[in-house]
Every structure is written in structure tokens, then in C-alpha cells.
């Protein structure tokens, strides 16, 4: 979706403000929001791309007014409500008011270390040969799906070059809808002047990781 | 609501979030969806165990050991896993090396993708709009915000983490470090130098 999360190239947000000796969390609720989002993710009731869409799928003003962990908390609430795992009145009351339903699994303390060591590999066996090779000229498709996509607006319609073939991977855009639909993944290199115009700094190169359905051959 | 601790306008908002997240955790616990002990462990892991010191060890080893450096640049995931760092947001790690002619900078314009096993959780600025919006259109300006000025002819290669690949920058080894061992080298490797918004520190005693 063309949401406020898709920020590459926007102006007006001001300078970057690094915080010296920044703590990992700035408030205790951030700790809990972070951890409960990971723990609910581990139940298997939704996947990472559904989580991302739940955070980004909101009015731009709402997205931009929330801090990062506020977005995490809001996204997790949204997923819980959509799936009927929790009801709005329960969040207001701060206690369970309705029967729960079984989730696929509950993350126990003993499972935390093995889960973190395992990670979440997204590479999958290829079912067809890769369409593009390193060095091929490609163009990012001009598509504007109102759903989750990992094709950022600032590269759509622009010409680039295949820099690396990264294997067949879970296709994020489809995964957000509930099917992995593995596709070849490429690192695509774009010249800064192609993206930002002839006056752009000629020393800038931007690369973006895109799946085959995001790309077409460039003639 | 107790406003005694509020020193700015954010205070009451934080209190609202504290209440809301606490309510959510209570409901999820009562419903049997989460185990608070697992949450405690997740927090402790990312607050005290997994952080940029992991990445600094990887970089220092690459500086000190040419064979490891080659392996790291060829197969980052395996080379990093060999040091015991693997897992969430890190299965597909790719190391990119700074050279005298190319400087690498990592961003996630769409959200906050970051190589957790080697750098821990990202700082606020990495997840915030100023960095995510400008890194791809004005990387030199972003570097200036960090006090880094590169030669005008240096190529700046920006890596937008739009898939599940995660990038670790291998900064250039500072001059005058030939006599240092891996632990001493690791102390020169800052978090920002592994994102690309900084350079490795010069050793003590260097002007």
C-alpha cells in the first residue's frame, strides 16, 4: 500500500538525531510491547509480513504520530482483534472476559533460546529457473497494490541492474495474504541519477532486494 | 492519574502506553496465549546478551584473519554463525566491505529490518522517519548528521533492506592498528560503523 511507512525519498522530516549512549529500551512498556509481540508471533497465528502490514495499514497521520513500539503494540492489538483471539472490551477492561481459543503453540521460557537460534529461514526450493542473471538490465514494475508490498515507491518504474541472485525466497507480498508463493529474489542496483534525476549526486548507488514479480526486463 | 513524574508532554502519553500494554499482557496471559517468563527472557536476551559487541567480534576477526574475511564476504551467514551468532533476523546475513573508493550504508526504508544477531535491536533513529526517508536520496547529508564527511569522489552504496536479507557493514580498518589483537581491534568497532553511519575508531594515542 502507498502508506506513510514507505518513506524513501520523502522530505521534511528534519535531521537524523542520534542519541548518545542510547538504552535498548526507553520505558518499561517498550520492553513488554516488544516481547509480547515476539511471543505472539511465535504462536504461529500470523506471520512476519502480516505483522508488518498490521503496523503500516493505517492513516498516514496515525502512522507518523506513533513511536516505533507504539506501532508494534497497535499492530499486535489489531492482529489479535482481527483473529478473534482478544476482544476490544477485554483490552479496555485489562482482563479476560471471554473464553480463549487454542493457539498453535505457546512460547515457553525454555523455548526462547532454541527459537532465537533457529531464526526464521525464508529460503525455499526453486520450482523454476531464475528469469534474470547478474548484469541483466531490469525495470521495477509500476504497480500500486493497496495491500502489503515490499516494492518501495521510489524505485517503481525505474531501471536498474541485477547485482546478485539471492535464491528462491518466501514472497513477502503473497505471504502477507497467507501463502508463501516462493519467488526468486534479487539485489537490484539503481543509479542515484536514475532514481532522483540528473542533478542527483552521481556517487550514490542504491540497491533494493526485489522478487521476480516486482521486475520486468528493461529494453 | 499520577503526574508527579511528568516532566514533559510525553509523560502522560507514556503512562497511557504503560497501562495499555500492561492490560494487553494481562489479557494474553489470562487467556493462555503467552508465558510472562518467556517475555522476561526475550527482554533480557536483547537487553544484555545480543548487541553490537557481537558484530564487533565479527569485524575484528575479518580484519585480523584474511581467510575469515574472504569467507565472511562470500557467505556471511555461515561465517557469522561459526562465531556463535545466528538466529532471528539473521539467517540471511550479508557482509559488505568498505574500501577507499566505496562506502556502504544500510537502511530499511519500509520498516526497521536490522541484523539482530550481530547488532542487537536497532536504535530509535534507525527506525525513525528522518533516517528512513533520507538515507536513499541524500546519504551524504545523513552522514554529515553523524559528523562523517567522505571524499566527494567516494561511491556511497546504500542497501535498502526490503527482503529478509540483513546487511552488516565491515568498516575499514584504521591505520596504526597492526600491533593490536582481535579483542583490541573489536574495541574500535562501533555500532554505527557497522551500519555505515560511522567509521571505526582510531586507536588510542593516534592524533
Image (cartoon, helix red, strand yellow):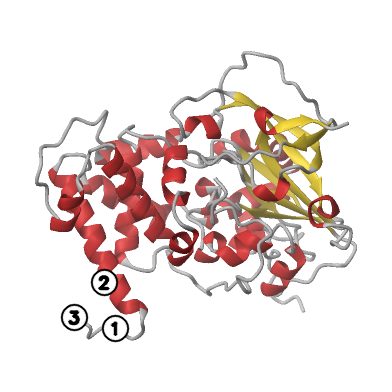
Residue B181 versus residue B48: which sits nearer the camera?
B48
Judge left or right: residue A125 versus residue A41.
Answer: right
Q: In which quadrant will I find the N terminus of chain A? A: top right
Residue A145 versus residue B84: which sits nearer the camera?
A145
| Callout 1: chain | B
Residue reaching furthest to the top: A127
Q: Position of residue B131 (x, y in %)?
A: 62, 64
Disc 3 crowd, CA 10 A, few/some/many (<14, 14-19, 20+) = few
Q: Position of residue B97 (x, y in %)?
A: 75, 49
Whether marks 1 and 3 lie on the same chain:
yes
Disc 1 crowd, CA 10 A, few/some/many (<14, 14-19, 20+) = few
Count numbered badges in the picture: 3
| Callout 2: chain | B
Residue at image position (48%, 70%) is: A22
Q: Dot 3 corresponds to which residue?
A: B2
Q: In which quadrant will I find the C terminus of chain A? A: top right
Mark found first going from the N terminus, 3 or 2: 3
- Estimate the spatial distance between the alpha carbons at disc 3 and disc 2, rounded to whole Å: 9 Å
Judge left or right: residue B142 versus residue B165.
Answer: right
Q: Is residue B123 above or below residue A106?
A: below
- Estimate the spatial distance between the alpha carbons at disc 1 and disc 3, rounded to whole Å: 8 Å
Disc 2 crowd, CA 10 A, few/some/many (<14, 14-19, 20+) = some
Mark number for residue A77?
none
| Callout 3: chain | B
- Estimate the spatial distance between the alpha carbons at disc 2 and disc 1, rounded to whole Å: 9 Å
Residue A110 versus residue A62: which sits nearer the camera?
A62
Q: Dot 1 corresponds to which residue?
A: B6
Q: Position of residue B54 (x, y in %)?
A: 53, 51
Q: Is residue A94 above or below residue B71?
A: below
Asked whether the beta carbons under mark 3 and mark 2 sit within 8 Å of each other, the answer is: yes
Asked whether the beta carbons under mark 2 and mark 1 sit within 8 Å of each other, the answer is: yes
Amino acid at each position: 500500500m502507498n502508506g506513510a511507512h514507505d518513506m524513501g525519498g520523502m522530505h521534511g522530516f528534519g535531521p537524523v538525531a542520534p542519541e548518545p549512549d542510547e538504552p535498548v529500551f526507553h520505558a518499561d512498556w517498550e520492553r513488554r510491547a516488544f516481547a509480547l509481540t515476539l511471543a505472539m508471533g511465535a504462536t504461529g497465528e500470523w506471520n512476519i509480513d502480516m505483522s508488518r502490514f498490521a503496523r503500516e495499514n493505517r492513516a498516514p497521520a496515525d502512522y507518523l504520530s506513533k513511536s516505533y513500539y507504539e506501532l508494534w503494540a497497535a499492530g499486535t492489538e489489531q492482529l489479535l482483534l482481527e483473529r478473534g483471539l482478544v476482544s476490544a472490551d477485554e483490552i479496555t477492561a485489562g482482563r479476560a472476559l471471554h473464553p480463549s481459543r487454542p493457539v498453535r503453540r505457546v512460547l515457553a521460557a525454555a523455548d526462547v533460546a532454541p527459537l532465537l537460534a533457529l531464526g526464521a529461514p525464508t529460503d525455499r526450493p526453486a520450482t523454476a529457473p531464475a528469469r534474470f542473471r547478474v548484469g541483466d538490465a531490469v525495470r521495477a514494475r509500476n504497480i500500486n497494490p493497496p495491500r502489503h508490498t515490499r516494492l518501495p515507491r521510489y524505485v517503481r518504474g525505474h531501471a536498474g541492474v541485477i547485482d546478485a541472485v539471492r535464491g528462491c525466497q518466501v514472497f513477502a507480498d503473497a505471504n502477507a495474504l497467507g501463502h508463501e508463493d516462493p519467488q526468486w529474489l534479487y539485489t537490484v542496483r539503481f543509479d542515484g541519477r536514475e532514481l532522483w534525476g540528473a542533478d542527483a549526486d552521481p556517487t550514490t548507488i542504491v540497491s533494493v532486494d526485489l522478487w521476480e514479480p516486482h521486475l520486468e526486463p528493461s529494453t | 492519574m499520577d503526574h508527579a513524574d511528568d516532566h514533559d508532554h510525553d509523560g502522560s502519553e507514556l503512562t497511557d502506553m504503560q497501562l495499555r500494554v500492561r492490560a494487553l499482557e494481562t489479557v494474553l496471559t489470562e487467556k493462555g496465549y503467552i508465558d510472562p517468563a518467556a517475555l522476561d527472557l526475550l527482554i533480557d536476551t536483547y537487553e544484555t546478551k545480543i548487541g553490537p559487541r557481537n558484530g564487533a567480534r565479527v569485524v575484528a576477526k575479518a580484519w585480523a584473519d584474511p581467510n575469515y574475511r574472504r569467507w565472511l564476504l562470500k557467505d556471511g551467514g555461515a561465517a557469522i554463525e561459526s562465531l556463535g551468532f545466528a538466529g532471528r533476523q539473521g539467517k540471511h546475513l550479508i557482509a559488505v566491505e568498505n574500501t577507499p573508493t566505496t562506502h556502504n550504508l544500510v537502511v530499511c526504508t519500509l520498516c526497521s529490518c536490522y541484523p539482530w544477531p550481530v547488532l542487537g535491536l536497532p536504535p530509535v533513529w534507525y527506525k525513525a522517519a528522518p533516517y528512513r526517508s533520507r538515507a536513499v536520496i541524500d546519504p551524504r547529508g545523513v552522514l554529515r548528521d553523524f559528523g562523517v564527511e567522505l571524499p566527494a569522489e567516494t561511491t556511497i552504496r546504500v542497501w535498502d533492506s526490503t527482503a529478509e536479507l540483513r546487511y552488516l557493514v565491515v568498516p575499514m580498518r584504521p591505520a596504526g592498528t597492526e600491533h593490536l589483537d582481535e579483542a583490541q581491534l573489536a574495541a574500535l568497532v562501533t555500532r554505527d560503523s557497522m551500519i555505515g553511519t560511522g567509521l571505526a575508531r582510531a586507536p588510542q594515542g593516534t592524533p
